[in-house]
Amino acid sequence: MDKPRDLIIIGGGAGGLVVASVAAQLGLKVTLIEKEAKLGGDCLHHGCVPSKTLIHAAKVASLMHRAKDYGLPTVTPKVDLGLVNDHVQSVIDQIQVHDDPERFRGYGCEVLFGQATFINAHTLRVGDDEIRSRRFVVATGSQPFVPPIDGLKEADYLTNLDIFSLRQLPKRMVVLGGGPIGLEMAQAFSRLGSKVTVVERLAHLLPQEDPEIADALKAVLETEGIDVRTSTSAEKVYKEHGATIVQCDGGLNLEADTLLVAVGRRPTVEGLGLDAAGVNYDARGIKVDRRLRTSQKHIYACGDVCGPYPFTHMAEYQAGIVISNAIFRFPKKTDYRVVPWVTYTDPELARVGLTEQQARDKGIDPLVLRFPFKGVDRALAEVETAGLVKLVAHKGKILGASILGPQGGELLHEIVLAMKTGAKIGDISATIHAYPTLSQVHRRTVNTWFGKKLFSPSTRNVVKWVNRILP
């Protein structure tokens, strides 16, 4: 056994790569261990990158079908899913260059591939080798959760791990789960030509979102021809005459050529030997404090494996907290008060802060402002008018916002910055927004309130009085 490392990072995804890059370039003796044969993690290979690439390809197909909306002849694309997924892989390959192991080795970081297992709180086993370290970071991410549905394990189902390897477009697809992954893939495959049914056991899609906004998105998806079944549970899956049958409550039987399971994620903790290291964890992942320390203070965790938000941008944010605490030894705590996230359907559903109901649950009587995209000139010009902005405020401060609309994820950041800096809705109203842009929706939203004040009877009386007495 050689000299102990300064830092060992387990997991070569977004969070682990950020920590490894910084630590190695600062001259520490660093080892990065990844179970799979390549770096980049779920986001690059099975999540954010391939899904958004596929979604955009499906958007192009949708625009071809909608060409008449723009005064152009309608075109029906001949979709070859194999070619589409070749394009998806080409984008992954371009980004993979940034996650080349040799790049990290060039920083002085040792990169190992294999399962890392704690033997004790300071020692790991990787293959036949045992290595020690002063500090550790666990960043192993998450993986698809497969529910205990009768017959599902025996059925030919897909998850986000293999959906981007399909070569043939399924005629019929059933998607179990009305969360972000399920809806994004449902809409993408529907636009490419599959007949898609979404099964969600809860009453609303996207249960973490404002129900009003989630229901508005459901209406859009149904308009596009997606069969959305909420308050519906899959009870059994079996094969019949070459088709996959999903038997649901209420006597509903759904036939599919492809079954996509997208009912959630679970933290990847298996095989890590966390018990041997004395690290506390449960079904929700590794337990950490606000400095991202586990029950063993020299062992840190970041990203999906500890939560609470399963987003790549949160893994990167948490990696920064770990760097401050584990590398610079400067105490820093997480701050989750302003966390943005986006579901990349079309229109996109972007969210930050509190929903209306969450504000009321906290005893706040919020000011709730809404404005539809059909009232925004740029949205009209682009024939992308579905959706609305819903802003939740109190005493002039923004508590949260939900944006269902074109480029909702891009538009969200004006609200994120306003919340982070403490700007008030009056500041948004007073800010000049270029015309014609989609971002004008923010000013139009807050001005629904200022307009009521401006044209109130009391204001009208004051204006009349001022104009009578002044020359």
Image (cartoon, grey):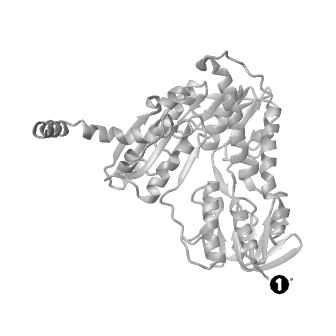
Q: Picture coordinates of residue 364 (x, y %)?
A: 33, 53
Residue 389 on image: x %, y %: 45, 39
Left or right of residue 410, residue 92 in this image: right
Residue 295 makes an appearance in the image: no
Residue at left offset 78%, top offset 68%: 32
Residue 379, compared with residue 449, is above or below; it is: above
Splitting the image into 4 quarters, where does residue 117 fall?
bottom right
Which SS class for mark 1? loop
Rendered view: 435 above or below 47: above
The residue at the far bottom in this view is 3
What is the quadrant of the N terminus in the image? Answer: bottom right
Type of amino acid at the residue the image marks with label 1: Lys
Residue behind mark 1: 3
**Residue 270 spot, x, y in % from top left:** 73, 63
> Which residue is the extreme one toward the left?
469
Image quarter where the C terminus lies is: top left
Look at the picture and state if 118 lies above or below 53: below
